[in-house]
Image (cartoon, rainbow, N blue to C red):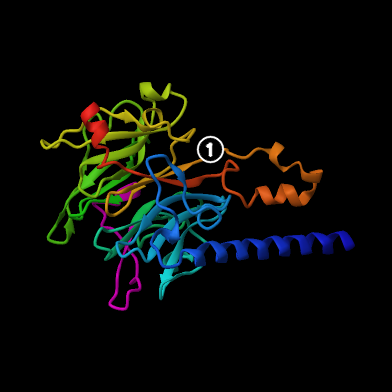
Amino acid sequence: MKKRIKLSLLLTMLIIASNQIFCQNVISGSKNDYLGQQLPGTNPTIFAPEIISTGMYERDFTISPDGNEIYYSLFQGDWNTIMLAKRINGIWQEPVVAPFARDTSFFFAEPTISIDGSKIFYLSTKPRGNEKAKPGWNNQNIWVAERKLDGEWGEPKPLPENINEFEEFYPSLTSDGTLYFCRTDAKTEVSQILRSKLVNGQYQNPIILPAPINEKGTIFNACIAPDDGYMIGCVTGRDSTNLNRATYMLFFHNADDTWSKGIDLIKELNLPCPNAVSISVSYDGKYLFFASTQKTIKFKDIQSGWKLNSIMKRRLVPGNGNSDIYWMKIEDGFKILRNKK
């Protein structure tokens, strides 16, 4: 019994300590965008360590154009959901599960806010009216909620069936509302990237993007630049990946609606990322966010007395091998890479 009491006390102390760290980190930069974090240069760094990147499995990132709301995905295996960090009266609050993602019977992930801040799109496995509830990642559809006059989100709705035809995920938007998204092909079960233009408030029938976007291998979880000038996707099975991993691959969008050959960003920019997971660009096109399972701490770093306390602390530190969110500055929207290639 005494051992159980000591363990319970230890867990309580760790929770209190983590809350104190959160408060200290957030309050110190409460007046600034991006949770008061020091803005990155062209070398990627972990975003908001111990606030957003906590040692749990975080990925996907979007920020509202007024800088007051940050949404990201938190994966926990048996329940995956979307978190919200919100700035109220100039003070950043502790992240909470987003109001539209609190049904523990279904998964929620991959949020993205429209460039004007009026809508939020995301993946949900919640069944639509014509679907039955299924376990796990079944019933993947893209949902949307619109901003109400009071600033809160209205009742979410799935996008129409011309978008949600089979298994759809990872929405991404341009400044004119054009929607790019992923769809798993019903016959081949291979992921493809599609585009649907917004005309008079209605999404048109999507088209499958041509090669080299949808070509050899598989492309998934792709984001589009706000100005539609380039796309970055997670790609497997291309020469630059040695067929062993997923990489972040950059494609430039040409004026004639063709696309350039892919550039392996992990290789080209030496990104700290063993496998591509998810990627996004800030609403102003200045910053790139990507998920990485790069392990920067080792078990040998926790040898202090070889005690349970030191081992448990490792679970609360980014860089432990779970997915963290990194960010970096994009120099003129990859202008250097465009000129180079």
Residue 240 left/right relative to 303: left
Residue 164 located within the stretch drawn in magenta: yes
Residue 331 left/right relative to 85: left
**Residue 252, relative to residue 132: is it above or below?**
above
Could you classify mark 1 by the number of other residues whose Cα lies within 10 Å: few (under 14), some (14-19), or many (20 or more)?
Answer: some
- Of 77 and 315, nearer the camera is 315
Secondary structure mostly taken by the magenta-highlighted segment of the chain: loop
Instruction: Indicate the quadrant containing the N terminus: top left, top right, bottom left or bottom right.
Output: bottom right
Q: Residue at x 29, y 61 (%)?
A: 65
- Of 263 and 126, nearer the camera is 263
- Of 196 and 178, nearer the camera is 178
Residue 283: x and y in percent read 29, 54
Residue 136 located within the stretch drawn in magenta: no
Q: Residue at x 35, y 73 (%)?
A: 152
Helix or strand or loop: what does disc 1 sit on? loop
Residue 177: x and y in percent read 20, 55
**Residue 105, relative to residue 330: is it above or below?**
below
- Of 329 and 237, nearer the camera is 329
- Disc 1 designates what residue? 294
Residue 212: x and y in percent read 25, 29
Indicate the quadrant where residue 150 lies: bottom left
**Residue 250, relative to residue 66: is it above or below?**
above
Indicate the quadrant where residue 156 lies: bottom left
Looking at the picture, which amino acid does disc 1 mark? Gln
**Residue 87, relative to residue 161: is it above or below?**
below
Q: Which residues are magenta?
A: 143-171
Could one spot residue 152 in this view of the protein? yes
